[in-house]
Image (cartoon, rainbow, N blue to C red):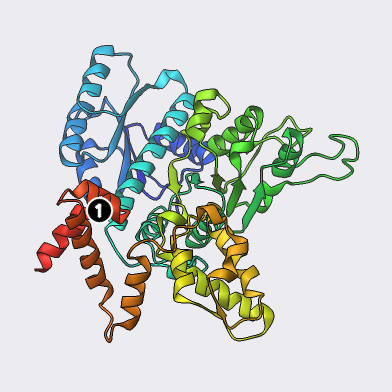
Amino acid sequence: MKKNPEFSLLLVDDEESWLRTLSLSLLSAAAIDNVQTCRDGRKVMSILEKEDVGLVLLDLTMPNLQGEEILQEIRARHPDIKVIIITGRNDVDAVVQCMKNGAFDYFIKIWGEDRLITGIRHAVQIVELERQNRRSGERLLERELDHPEAFASIVTASDAMGRIFRYIEAIAASREPVIVTGESGVGKEEIARAIHNVGGRGELVGVNMAGLNDSMLEDTLFGHKRGAFTNAQDERGGLVVRARDGTLFLDEIGEMSNPSQAKLLRFIQEGEYYPIGSDVPKKLSCRVVVATNRDLEAGLKDGSFRRDLFYRFAHRIHIPPLRERREDVPLLVAHFLRRSAEVFHRKPQTVSPAAMLMLSRYGWPGNVRELQKTILHTASLATDVLDVDDFLPMLDVEAIPDRNAPGAEDLLDLLLRLEEMPSFAEMKQIMTNAALIRSGGRQTAAAKILGISQPALSKRLKAERAED
C-alpha cells in the first residue's frame, strides 16, 4: 500500500514515549504514515544514506551527539533534506543559531501538538513541491512520453503541446491542485482529462462554474443534509463525494464569486467542506483541476479573484492558441474529416492545397472548437474535394489572409511541382536562412518573421551548426 508522503519523515529524539505519541498524532491528524524514528543521534547519518528521507524532526538535546552537530552534518551532506528543530527548552540563542545553520523551522514542545502538526504539514508540502519541480525539470528534458495513451484524444504535432504533455507526466505523482489557462476553444477540458488519465486513480468529475450562483454551486459541489432547505427531502453527497480519490475538474473558475472561492480554498487547503445545513465538516481527498479563459492576473488587481486561492495552485499549465501552433491545423483538419466521414457514412473528403493553405494561415479566434465546427459544417457538403470557396461562408472574410500574397501560392505551387519534396528538416533550414537574409542577419527580426521566439531560433541555429 502506498505511504503518505512518498518520502520518509525521520523523528530523532531520545524519549521513546514522545516518538510514539508524535507518530500516532501524525497518522490520526495528518494521515502521515511514512515515519521512521531514531533515539540515537549517531545513527542519523547512516539512516539518511540508506533511506529516502525528506524531512527530519530533530531534538536539540540528545545524548552522545548534540542536535546542533547533527544539524550541521545533515546540511553539509544532504542539503535537500529539511530539518525542523524540536526543543523542550526556550533557548532563544540556540534556536537562532540553528536557523542560521540552515534549519527549516523550530518548535518548542510546550507550544502544543496542534501547532507542531500544522508546521509539519507545511514542511511536507514544501518538500513535495520541491521534489516535484525537480522531477518536472528532468522530465521536460526527455522527448518520449511514458503514457502516450493518456493523450490519444489530443491531435497535435506542436512542440509546445509536447512540452505540456511531458510536464503533465512529470507532475503525475503530485496531488497538488492544477490550473489550466487558455483562450476559449483551445482544449482545456481535454488537458484536464489527460491529467486525470496519467494519474490513473478514481473518477473524473467535471462541472462548469458559469451560470451557477453561490447556493447552487455549494449544493452542486458539497451537497446538503436532509431538511437543509425547502424540498431537501434526502441527503445529497455532492460532486466531491463522486470525485473521492479521483479528480474534480472545475471549468470557468474565473466566474466564481469571492465567497465561493473562499469555500473552494478551504477544501483545497484542508480537504474539508461543509454540506449545506451541517455544522460538522467532512474530509475527503481528491485532486482538483481548474480551468479558465479569463485573465486572472487582472482579477487579482481588481479583487474579483482571491490572491490566496490563485497562489494555492501549485501547478500551472497554459495552452497556446491555435494561431501559435499552425502546424496542428492540417492534422486537425484530417482528423475532423475522418469524424465527419463516420457521421455521414462515406469516404473521407480531401481539402485542396489552396484551401489547406488558407486554413493554416487563418487566425482561428475560436481555436480548435471553431476549426471543428467549420470542418464538420463544410464537410456536410456533398463534394469530394473541399476548396477555398466552400469554407468562406464559415469564416470571417476580413480576417482571411490575402490569398494573393506574394510568394504564398507560388511557393505552394512550386512544392507541388517538385519531383522530390525536400525533407521537413531541410524546409526548416531553408525558411530559417530566408528569414535571416530578409532580416539582414538580425536574429530577433528573423524570429519574428518565422513566428518563433529568439531563444528558439538561437537554439535551432546552434543545432544546425552542431550537425554541420
Residue drawn at x 44%, y 51% as measured from the top left: 320
Crowd rating for badge 1 (residues with CA inside 10 Å; few <14, some 14–19, many 20+): few
Residue drawn at x 68%, y 80% as measured from the top left: 344
> Who is closer to the viewer here, 176 or 122?
176
Instruction: Determine the image quadrant of residue 110.
Output: top left
User: In the shown orientation, is residue 380 left or right of residue 194?
Assistant: right
The percent position of residue 390, horizontal first and vertical second, equals: 59, 71
Residue drawn at x 68%, y 53% as measured from the top left: 242
> As displayed, is residue 160 above or below residue 121?
below
Q: Is residue 299 visible?
A: yes
- Please state which amino acid type lies under the numbered disc 1: Ala
Can you identify the residue that label 1 sits on?
A: 456
Is the C terminus in the top left, top right, bottom left or bottom right quadrant?
Answer: bottom left
> Who is closer to the viewer here, 405 or 80?
405
User: In the shown orientation, is residue 462 left or right of residue 391?
Assistant: left
Disc 1 element: helix
Q: In this figure, what is the number of numbered marks?
A: 1
Residue drawn at x 41%, y 38% as measured from the top left: 125
> Who is closer to the viewer here, 415 or 136?
415
The percent position of residue 170, horizontal first and vertical second, equals: 37, 55
User: In the shown orientation, is residue 375 left or right of residue 423?
Assistant: right
User: In the shown orientation, is residue 175 left or right of residue 426?
Assistant: right
The percent position of residue 399, horizontal first and vertical second, equals: 51, 53
